[in-house]
Image (cartoon, grey):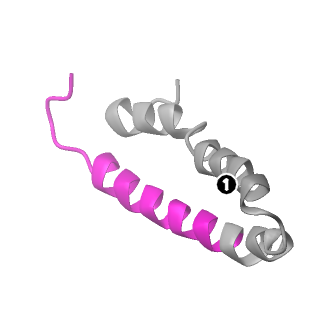
Amino acid sequence: MREQPTLRIPFGVLALLVALLIYGVLVARYVAPVMEGWHALLQTPVYILLGVIWLLPLKRFLIWMETGRWG
């Protein structure tokens, strides 16, 4: 358990927000135009997949924010 305050948590939250903003802009800029002519039922699983992909590295990132270690 942490006994002293650390800047990892506020830095981590800001880094996460920036990373999600960049990810969202990249998806909107490059993926959306490719799929704009697709039927909505074909677009839905792609957006669900893209909405879940960013969660994959999140566990290790949250561990780092709390402990300072990546694993």
| x and y, in percent, of residue 24 in the image | 59, 67
Q: Which residue is mark 1?
A: 47
* Residue 59 shown left or right of residue 32 in the figure: left
Highlighted range, magenta: 1-26
Asked if residue 4 is positioned above or below residue 38 in the image, the reply reads above
Front residue of 63/38: it is 38
| x and y, in percent, of residue 65 in the image | 37, 40
Front residue of 17/69: it is 17
Q: Amino acid at mark 1?
A: Tyr
Image quadrant where residue 16 sits: bottom left
* Residue 69 shown left or right of residue 3 in the figure: right
Q: Residue at x 59, y 50 (%)?
A: 51
Q: How many marks?
A: 1
Q: Is residue 23 magenta?
A: yes
Mark 1, secondary structure of its residue: helix
Dominant secondary structure of the residues highlighted in magenta in the image: helix
Asked if residue 69 is positioned above or below residue 21 in the image, the reply reads above
Q: Residue at x 69, y 67 (%)?
A: 27
Q: Residue at x 79, y 63 (%)?
A: 39
* Residue 59 shown left or right of residue 54 in the figure: left
Q: Is residue 9 magenta?
A: yes
Viewport quadrant of the N terminus: top left
* Residue 50 shown left or right of residue 71 in the figure: right
Q: Residue at x 84, y 74 (%)?
A: 37
